[in-house]
């Protein structure tokens, strides 16, 4: 056992074939870590219900305002809460990177032949899966609380897709900020600064027509709102698929651009070492 | 043949030159120590040689591969154990090894065999399926080193491998490193600020100070350059220092006399034989001596000689 075995694709430095395999390792590692901390799993599963039930009760009579068109508020709220979950999951994902950096795991991984993209994809797919689980819980709990989804399964699937794209974008942004800022305090501070306004500058919990005009304008540039609009439209009885696809396209574009910037941020991190 | 060649490496952080034309070479199959206080530039050198960081100037080859031009090839050929223990605490020992090996593209079967072999050799077989967070510091460090070896690297970097370990775990780690070097034919670069560690493990070493190599050689060579024992006298108060220094100069064979605070140092050919003469001379000068010690030349003395400071002074 004295021979050194280095697979050919590694020794040539061309390792593209394993990008997906490596991404899957990182995803599984994250899931395993989550699974071994039952408290986190519980919080993750309970949080979407709390938001749905809390906001559902708090703003129950809001539908009496003009602009809601007399809908049931829980119907209105379900896609909004899914998007909120997507936003917060994404915004927190960078803390995973910071933990890796603090533990020295990031540096250890960076001196293996692994591609940086695999670390990003691993983080994205883990967070998108978490969001998928949470989103399904929101839809189920919403149904039990009396929400109806005239769009049926295609509508629900489209809503979850929109939320996953939203999470992917914010996850990349949060990861990039983690690589640039390198402390949890700075990352969380900046994330809070961004997430709450983005949530309130959208139609997640409030109908557009019931909000002041400047917020209506701002929300049309807000990816959180794109996810909410795509979801709400796809859940109607006869969706305008043009609107849905336009919003999904916007979300995909944002996710791609932020994903690219996230990968680039590794360069900045390594230059700082 | 040399497995590591560092050629005038320069790295600056702002105005601080962490590496200032650092050069050294490590022959294949040997253990080489980079010895120096914290902040001397050892870790920066390791970061560059392991491709984590890029040099601002100079160049380096590891396992014959240029670290700037082909970092991916270097990464496949090296194992790296960083200063901080970097295992995933939520994963078991075995899972840590398997994931890390998978990143090198090892096949599942190959990987299972190698992981089993390494856990047996590092006495982790019983704990293999427990989460790493339940391990003691010494066990985590062993797992850490095992991860660095999973893909049978040609060159292993150990950055301060025993920092933070208790004396017992440190001794166990020393035995392990010595065995590795002997059995696996690895080239090992070890950084340390423990003189004893470099003395015990390294076949050759370079003393690093302020980003430069100040001297290089085997521990014995370096110590024998000093010729003679160190004699250290601690006075009761510092007022007597000038008279004491004067008195010491007249003692036959005393040389390289230095003072720091109320401590006097000198080098003599035979320490034990010189003590009475030194005490008599100091007594005659009316200087009160609190303690006197004689020491065989140590790497600390080598460090003092080449940098003008004692190791403890810098570490403090």
Image: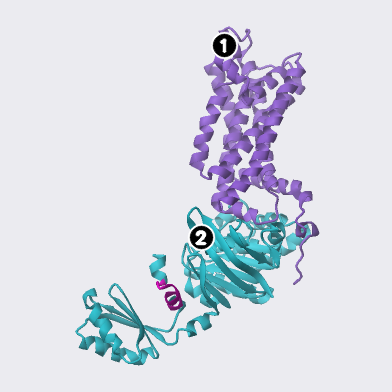
Chain colours: A purple, B cyan
Disc 2 packing (10 Å; few <14; some 14–19; many ≥20): many
Q: Secondary structure at mark 2?
A: strand
Q: Position of residue A233 (x, y in %)?
A: 71, 17
Residue at x 51% of width, y 32% of height: A192
Q: CA distance from mark 1 to mark 2?
A: 60 Å
| Foreground tag (1 vs 2) | 2
Asked if residue B126 shows in the view, the reply is no
Asked if residue B60 shows in the view, the reply is yes
Residue at x 56% of width, y 61% of height: B10
Q: Position of residue A155 (x, y in %)?
A: 74, 21
Instruction: Pick whichever, B172 or A200, lies toward us.
Output: A200
Instruction: Pick whichever, B80 or A258, lies toward us.
Output: A258
Question: In the image, is residue B44 part of the stretch drawn in magenta?
Answer: no
Q: Secondary structure at mark 1?
A: helix
Q: Is residue A118 above or below residue B63?
A: above
Q: How many marks?
A: 2
Name the residue carrying label 1. Answer: A210
Q: What is the chain letter for disc 1? A: A
Q: Quadrant of residue A63?
A: top right
Name the residue carrying label 2. Answer: B18
Residue at x 56% of width, y 50% of height: A101
Helix, strand or loop for the magenta stretch, by majority: helix
Disc 1 packing (10 Å; few <14; some 14–19; many ≥20): some
Residue at x 60% of width, y 41% of height: A176
Q: Is A40 on the left-hand or right-hand side of B119?
A: left
Q: Position of residue B191 (x, y in %)?
A: 54, 67
Span colored in magenta: B301-310
Q: Quadrant of residue B179?
A: bottom right
Q: Position of residue B178 (x, y in %)?
A: 60, 75
Instruction: Pick whichever, B303 or A225, lies toward us.
Output: B303
């Amino acid at each position: 056992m004295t021979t050194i075995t280095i697979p050919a694709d590694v020794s040539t430095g061309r390792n593209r074939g394993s990008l997906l395999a490596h991404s899957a390792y990182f995803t599984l590692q994250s899931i395993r870590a989550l699974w071994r901390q039952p408290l986190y799993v519980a919080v993750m599963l309970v949080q979407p219900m709390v938001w749905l039930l809390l906001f559902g009760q708090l703003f129950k009579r809001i539908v009496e305002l003009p602009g809601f068109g007399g809908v049931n508020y829980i119907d209105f709220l379900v896609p909004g809460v899914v998007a909120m979950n997507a936003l917060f999951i994404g915004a927190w994902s960078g803390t995973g990177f910071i933990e890796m950096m603090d533990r020295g795991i990031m540096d250890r991984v960076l001196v293996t032949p692994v591609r940086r993209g695999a670390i990003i994809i691993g983080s994205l797919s883990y967070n998108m899966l978490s969001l998928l689980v949470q989103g399904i819980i929101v839809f189920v709990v919403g149904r039990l609380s009396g929400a109806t989804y005239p769009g049926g399964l295609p509508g629900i699937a489209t809503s979850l897709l929109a939320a996953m794209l939203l999470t992917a974008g914010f996850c990349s942004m949060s990861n990039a900020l983690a690589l640039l800022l390198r402390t949890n305090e700075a990352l969380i501070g900046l994330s809070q600064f961004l997430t709450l306004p983005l949530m309130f500058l959208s139609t997640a919990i409030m109908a557009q027509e019931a909000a002041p005009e400047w917020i209506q304008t701002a929300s049309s540039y807000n990816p959180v709102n794109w996810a909410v609009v795509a979801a709400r439209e796809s859940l109607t009885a006869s969706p305008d698929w043009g609107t849905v696809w336009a919003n999904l396209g916007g979300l995909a574009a944002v996710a791609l651009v932020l994903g690219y910037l996230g990968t680039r941020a590794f360069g900045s991190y390594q230059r700082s070492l | 043949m040399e497995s590591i060649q560092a050629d005038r490496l320069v790295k600056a952080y702002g105005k601080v030159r962490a590496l200032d034309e650092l050069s050294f070479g490590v022959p294949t199959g040997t253990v080489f120590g980079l010895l120096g206080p914290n902040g001397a530039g050892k870790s920066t050198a390791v970061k560059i040689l392991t491709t984590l960081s890029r040099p601002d100037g100079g160049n380096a080859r590891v396992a014959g591969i240029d670290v700037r031009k082909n970092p991916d090839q270097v990464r496949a050929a090296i194992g790296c154990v960083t200063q901080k223990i970097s295992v995933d605490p939520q994963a078991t020992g075995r899972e840590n090894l398997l994931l890390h090996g998978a990143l090198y593209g090892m096949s599942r079967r190959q990987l299972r065999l190698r992981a089993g072999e390494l856990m047996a050799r590092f006495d982790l077989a019983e704990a293999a399926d427990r989460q790493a967070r339940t391990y003691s510091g010494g066990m985590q460090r062993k797992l850490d080193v095992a991860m660095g070896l999973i893909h049978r690297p040609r060159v292993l970097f150990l950055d301060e491998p025993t920092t933070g370990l208790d004396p017992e775990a440190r001794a166990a780690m020393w035995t392990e490193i010595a065995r590795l070097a002997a059995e696996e034919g690895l080239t090992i670069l070890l950084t340390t600020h423990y003189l004893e560690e470099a003395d015990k493990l390294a076949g050759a070493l370079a003393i690093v100070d302020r980003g430069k190599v100040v001297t290089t050689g085997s521990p014995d060579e370096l110590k024998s350059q000093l010729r003679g024992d160190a004699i250290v006298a601690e006075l009761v108060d510092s007022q007597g220092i000038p008279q004491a220094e004067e008195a010491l100069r007249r003692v036959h064979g005393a040389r390289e006399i230095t003072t720091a605070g109320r401590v006097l140092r000198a080098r003599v050919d035979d320490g034990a034989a010189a003590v009475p003469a030194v005490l008599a001379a100091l007594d005659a000068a009316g200087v009160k001596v609190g303690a006197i010690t004689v020491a065989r030349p140590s790497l600390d003395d080598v460090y003092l000689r080449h940098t003008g400071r004692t190791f403890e002074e810098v570490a403090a």
